[in-house]
Amino acid sequence: MIELSNEYLIVFLALIICSIMAIIRVIRGPTAPDRLVGLDTINTIVIVLMVIFGAATNQVIIIDVAIVYALLSFISTLFITKYLEGGDF
């Protein structure tokens, strides 16, 4: 079992509260760009959680996965933004 210090647990709890607020923004909207910003915020919080968890457990592979996830999240946000503007790919 992984033992985490109290500092890491406090940070995890704060980020989970932030992600709950972002989920509310995704659900309530009111427009598609608002939902996209909420979804991008959730992706950013997940990336931060992965990096903090990797640092807390001294596992570098989790940080590498977070970097790849950040790149894919950025590219998907660009594509969705381009779609919402009505442009061609």
Image (cartoon, rainbow, N blue to C red):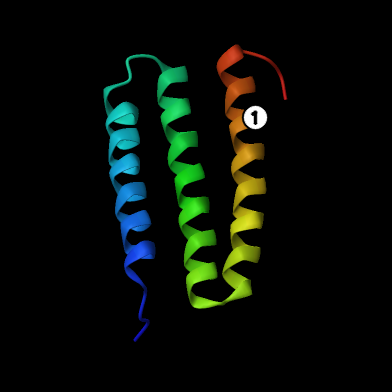
Residue 66 x %, y %: 59, 58
Residue at figure coordinates x 47%, y 66% from the top left: 53
Front-most of residues 46 and 82: 46
| Residue occupying the far bottom of the picture | 1
Please tell me in which quadrant of the rendered image residue 38 appears: top left
Quarter of the N terminus within the rendering: bottom left
**In the rendered view, does 87 fall on the left or right side of 42?**
right
Q: Position of residue 24 (x, y in %)?
A: 27, 31
Residue that carries the numbered disc 1 in the rendered image? 78
Q: At which x and y percent is residue 5?
A: 36, 72
Name the foreground residue: 32 vs 10.
10
Residue at 34% x, 29% y: name it: 26
State the residue in front, 59 or 80: 59
* Amino acid, disc 1: Leu
Q: Residue drawn at (34%, 40%), measured in percent from left and top?
A: 18
Q: Is residue 24 above or below residue 42?
A: above
